[in-house]
Image (cartoon, helix red, strand yellow):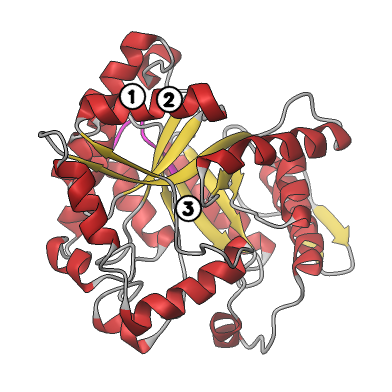
């Protein structure tokens, strides 16, 4: 199994004034560095630095939801320097950054990290965000992934560093050679696609799919489709699937579950409504756009919940999202993973050469 953290780049990961009031200041860099060290101490495989450019709503900004928010590329550098083995995945949007710029940022983050950097490939779906870059309306999803495939082809050619790149496609034209350094190996590529076209792209090119089904019961269908797409692309195996899930650990039985219910119940108001509308579009669902899988309880209870999900639904990895985030909260994960190690379903990164 693989475990990562969906990085809390703002005051709160969810549109909740209550959660925001209980979380640290995201503009204090030491809070991020302490959390990064805690992630490494807990033996997570990696962290995912999501990103965005525009606030989702004025109501969200008032409570610190998505605004202010740390830039994934900038924040990656101090986190890399504060850790030794933790994988660091940064989000870069293909419509907003030219392929050569993505290649340049990526090669330097790979150099800075000693080869433990990865790219979260994102096309973007918010027109109000794209307008910051002079794009009035984003193309449809299929067109975006067509362009993304061209961009990836250019980026990987640049990363090889074996000569000038001469590419002429429908969406990009690039000629020339970039200065080094170049990645030491192929960086990890991940995507959180929900559409069929997006998952075909992920199955063909990526190492991980970050999936966000409303229920773990939806996971087998996701895996089946990814296996089919990977086979059609000529790959021997599909990307690993990591499920986005909320996590809350407490010492006493019942405490974590009760607190999780209370916190999730605070996602209300206009900020919550606007966020759920965006989630419905992103996750391509209308029935429960704001519902995510969750693990809550004591370390033993959470370990049992993960084991049960593995047994019943084939769960093989989790991208944890912390409603309450801090170094102290992350360190609560350590005994959970130690319990999973005892069962043999999880091997600590150190024992596998910190391989992703």
Q: Earlier in the sequence, mark 3 or mark 2?
A: 3
The residue carrying mark 3 is: 90
Find numbered disc 1 in the image and state the secondary structure of the residue it sits on.
Answer: helix
Secondary structure of residue under mark 2: helix
Farthest residue toward the left? 252
The nearer-to-camera label among 3 and 1 is: 1
In the image, which residues are magenta?
Answer: 83-88
Provide the residue designation for mark 2. 308
Residue 286 location in percent, x, y? Answer: 59, 68
The rendered magenta stretch, by its main secondary structure, is classed as: loop
Residue contact between numbered discs 3 and 2, judged by CB atoms under 8 Å: no
Q: Which mark sits nearer the N-terminus, 3 or 1?
A: 3
Q: Is residue 168 above or below residue 78?
A: below
x, y percentage for residue 92? Answer: 55, 60
SS class, disc 3: strand
Which of 327/32 is in front?
A: 327
* Residue at 33 percent of width and 65 percent of height: 14
Name the residue tied to disc 1.
304
Name the residue located 32 percent from the left edge and 71 percent from the top edge: 15
Q: Is residue 85 magenta?
A: yes
- For disc 1, the neighbor class at 10 Å (few under 14, some 14 to 19, many from 20) is some
Q: Is residue 127 above or below residue 10?
A: below
Give the residue at x 64% y 63%: 284
User: Measured along the vertical axis of the image, is residue 288 above or below residue 343?
Assistant: below
Residue 84: x and y in percent read 31, 32
Q: Is residue 208 visible?
A: no
Task: Classify residue 251 as left or right of residue 167.
Answer: left
């Amino acid at each position: 199994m693989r475990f990562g953290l969906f990085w809390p780049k703002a005051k709160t990961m969810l549109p909740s004034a209550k959660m925001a009031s209980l979380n640290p200041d995201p503009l204090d860099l030491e809070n991020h560095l302490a959390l990064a060290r805690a992630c490494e101490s807990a033996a997570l495989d990696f962290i995912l630095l999501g990103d965005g450019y525009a606030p989702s709503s004025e109501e969200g900004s008032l409570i610190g939801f998505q605004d202010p928010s740390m830039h994934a590329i900038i924040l990656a550098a101090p986190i890399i320097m504060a850790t030794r083995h933790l994988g660091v995945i940064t989000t870069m949007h293909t419509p907003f950054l030219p392929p050569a710029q993505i290649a340049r940022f990526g090669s330097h983050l790979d150099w800075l990290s000693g080869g433990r950097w990865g790219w979260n490939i994102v096309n973007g779906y918010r027109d109000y965000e794209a307008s910051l870059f002079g794009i009035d309306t984003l193309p449809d999803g299929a067109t975006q992934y067509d362009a993304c495939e061209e961009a990836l082809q250019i980026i990987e050619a640049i990363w090889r560093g074996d000569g000038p790149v001469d590419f002429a496609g429908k969406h990009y034209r690039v000629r020339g050679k970039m200065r080094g350094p170049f990645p030491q190996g192929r960086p990890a590529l991940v995507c959180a696609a929900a559409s069929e076209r997006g998952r075909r792209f992920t199955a063909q090119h990526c190492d991980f799919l970050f999936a966000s089904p409303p229920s773990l019961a939806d996971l087998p269908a996701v895996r089946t489709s990814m296996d089919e797409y990977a086979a059609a692309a000529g790959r021997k195996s599909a990307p690993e699937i990591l499920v986005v899930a909320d996590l809350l650990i407490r010492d006493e039985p019942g405490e974590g579950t009760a607190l999780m219910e209370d916190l999730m119940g605070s996602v209300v108001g206009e900020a919550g409504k606007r966020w759920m509308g965006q989630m419905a579009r992103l996750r391509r669902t209308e029935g429960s756009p704001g519902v995510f899988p969750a693990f809550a309880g004591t370390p033993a209870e959470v370990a049992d919940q993960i084991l049960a999900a593995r047994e019943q639904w084939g769960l093989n990895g989790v991208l944890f999202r912390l409603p309450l985030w801090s170094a102290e909260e992350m360190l609560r994960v350590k005994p959970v993973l130690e319990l999973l190690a005892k069962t043999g379903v999880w091997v600590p990164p150190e024992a596998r050469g910190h391989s992703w």
